[in-house]
Image (spheres, grey):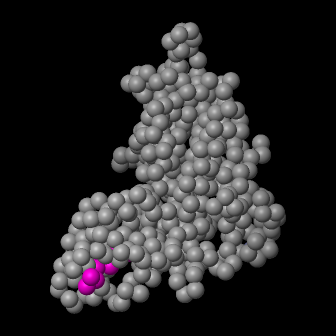
Amino acid sequence: MTSQEKFEKVVSLCKRRGFVYPSSEIYGGFANTYDYGPLGVQLLRSIKEIWWKKFVEDREDVYGLDGSVLLNPKVWQASGHVDNFTDPLVECKKCHKRYRQDFLEQEGETNCPECAGSLTEPKMFNGMFKTFVGPTEDTSSVAYLRPETAQAIFVNFSNVLNSFSPKIPFGIAQIGKAFRNEITAGNFIHRTLEFEQMELEYFIEEGNWEKEFEKWLFDMLKFAYDLGISKESLRVREHTSKERSHYSEKTVDVEYMYYFGWKELYGLAYRTDFDLKQHSKFSGKKLLYRNNETTEEFTPHIIEPSMGVGRTFLAVMLDSYVEDGDRIVLKLKPSLAPYKAAVFPLVRNKEELVKKAREVFDGLKLQFSTVWDDRGNIGKRYYSQDEIGTPYCITIDYQTLKDNTVTIRDRDTTKQKRIKIFDISLFVLKSI
Ligand SMILES: [Zn+2]
């Protein structure tokens, strides 16, 4: 199986089994937008919960935030997005397809990749979605959908400082949607118009930036490995000065190897004191940190680890997908599996078996996500659960009625063993 074949199989599995659907499909879809189905949303939630636990709850120096998508438009002037968040757009003179010039350069293309036609001179194009607040559509009512979650964190810097008096270094974290008016086709959910970010702004003293940068890079990689993304599919690449965003002094990408090349999975940027200084200048409010021991006041510098939820989702799906003979297995970490367990009555037409299985199911689903299946034969049910990554299948059979034991089957080894009903939940909980 080539990596392109695998990619296509995962896309098809996502649709077939309810992980990801093309958005507005009955209307022919809508380019670069997708909807997460019943199993996809479970996986997304798990990724976000694990991230939040690791980077917010388990730490004493990080505070959570949920800022709004619409912010005062002055925020985007201060941040530089109104002037600088632009990409060079070129158009093919022959087939009129549009491309990001910087992407073409990366691939070494100087002509249209589709028809080899020559390209127009680049035109700068702002990547923010513009909208209007209120009934009039004029310049005074313009607002933007946020292109990154970071700015809500900067504008709340003083609020968090006043409420919690954190000691530097400290961070403010947020998970939320961001919107970018992308013109380049997206390779499934890799590049979409709206996407969810897990972002953290870590406020530091300038002299420590290199040390903190290294620590965050390590933590980001560790997070990816812990979710089951393989080391071989990842690399770290530093941005050239030309690629770097206007605010950044150093940026590295954690890249994932797709069949269409190495592409950004996560980004880590040293944003210097640019953001707080800009907001201070534009708002007229002092955004300073005061060291209570030395009484010195200064503008903190910022390290920003930024991680995409959808991109994590895609990398996890690709690295979990395995074919074992005619069996398709999604070897998701049990903590990420949409269902932790499936419960089957051996047959669906024996009332005592069904009743017993229902009792087991009702007990388990209160503790973790559990699914019921009584369709077809047991073998088919196993295959069906393997394909969506359910780590354990529990079957209630005739012996259960005699001794309250069930078979529990492991997705990865396909081995079954008998355990007591009483022990099932501990057995599953230990693995997640
Ligand atoms: Zn063309």
- Front residue of this view, candidates 422 and 197: 422
* Residue pictured at 48% horizontal, 31% vertical: 61
Q: Point out the stretch of residues depicted in magenta.
A: 393-399
Where does residue 334 sit, x and y in percent of width and height?
Answer: 45, 63
Q: Is 255 located above or below residue 358 in the figure?
A: above
Image quarter (top left, top right, bottom left or bottom right) of the N terminus: bottom right
Image quarter (top left, top right, bottom left or bottom right) of the C terminus: bottom left
Where does residue 257 sit, x and y in percent of width and height?
Answer: 69, 63
On the image, which quarter does residue 431 sit in?
A: bottom left
* Residue pictured at 61% horizontal, 40% vertical: 216
- Front residue of this view, candidates 325 and 175: 325
- Front residue of this view, candidates 342 and 60: 342
* Residue pictured at 73% horizontal, 50% vertical: 237
Q: Is 254 located above or below residue 282 in the figure?
A: below
- Can residue 396 be found in the magenta stretch? yes
- Can residue 117 be found in the magenta stretch? no
Is residue 28 visible to us here? no
Q: Is 91 located above or below residue 82 in the figure?
A: below
Where does residue 268 sit, x and y in percent of width and height?
Answer: 64, 44
Is residue 213 visible to us here? yes
373 with respect to 315 (left or right)? left
63 with respect to 127 (left or right)? left
Judged from this view, the residue extending furthest toward the front is 403
- Front residue of this view, candidates 147 and 202: 202
* Residue pictured at 52% horizontal, 15% vertical: 290
Where does residue 341 sit, x and y in percent of width and height?
Answer: 36, 69
Q: Is 205 located above or below residue 48 in the figure?
A: above
On the image, which quarter does residue 190 sit in?
A: bottom right
393 with respect to 117 (left or right)? left
